[in-house]
Image: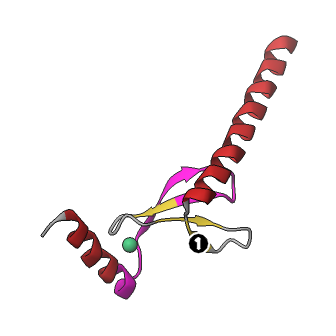
């Protein structure tokens, strides 16, 4: 059995017993990426808090949000340094 076939079998198992998602990335308090331990499928949370599949488009959007947050954080840190 090759890897692709194994993934298909795992997907089938997941569709029966449900995915076993674990947190792989936290962007904001409400925006997180999860990956299934079993089949490797990636999902994220939408504005309503529901799990939706993580598309390449969403990944790019989230990367943009992450960049803004990181920039904001580093700006805050710089301000603190300037005060101290
Ligand atoms: Zn799965």
Residue found at the far left of this picture = 1
Residue found at the far right of this picture = 83
Q: In which quarter of the image is residue 38?
A: bottom left
Quarter of the image with the N terminus is bottom left
Q: Which residue is at a point 36% across and 84% down the rendered structure image? A: 17
Residue found at the far bottom of this picture = 16
Q: Position of residue 80 (x, y in %)?
A: 82, 20
Residue underneath mark 1: 52
Q: Is residue 25 located in the magenta-colored stretch of the structure? A: yes
Please tell me how crowded label 1 is: few (under 14), some (14-19), or many (20+) other residues with Cα within 10 Å: few
In this rendering, is residue 46 above or below 30?
A: below
Q: Nearer the viewer, residue 22 or 16?
A: 16
Tell me if I can see residue 84 in this picture. no
The residue range painted magenta reads: 14-33
Q: Could you tell whether 29 is left or right of 4 in the image? A: right
State the colouring used for the structure image.
Answer: secondary structure
Q: Count the marks: how many? A: 1
Disc 1 secondary structure class? strand
Q: Where is residue 4 in the image (x, y as percent from the top left)?
A: 24, 67
Q: Where is residue 36 in the image (x, y as percent from the top left)?
A: 40, 66
In this rendering, is residue 82 above or below 68?
A: above
Q: Could you tell whether 21 is left or right of 54 in the image? A: left
Q: Position of residue 72 (x, y in %)?
A: 78, 33
Q: Is residue 71 located in the magenta-colored stretch of the structure? A: no
Ligand 1 position by quadrant:
bottom left
Q: Which residue is at a point 73% across and 40% down the rendered structure image? A: 69
Q: Which residue is at a point 64% across and 74% down the rendered structure image? A: 50
Q: Quadrant of residue 39?
A: bottom left
Disc 1 within 8 angstroms of ligand 1 (CB): no
Q: Nearer the viewer, residue 76 or 16?
A: 16
């Amino acid at each position: 059995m090759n890897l692709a076939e194994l993934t298909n079998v795992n997907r089938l198992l997941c569709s029966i017993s449900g995915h076993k998602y674990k947190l792989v990335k936290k962007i904001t308090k409400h925006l997180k990426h999860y990956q299934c331990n079993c089949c490797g499928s990636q999902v994220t949370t939408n504005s309503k808090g529901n799990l939706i599949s993580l598309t390449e488009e969403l990944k790019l959007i989230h990367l943009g949000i992450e960049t803004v947050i990181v920039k904001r954080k580093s700006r805050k840190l710089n301000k603190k340094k300037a005060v101290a």
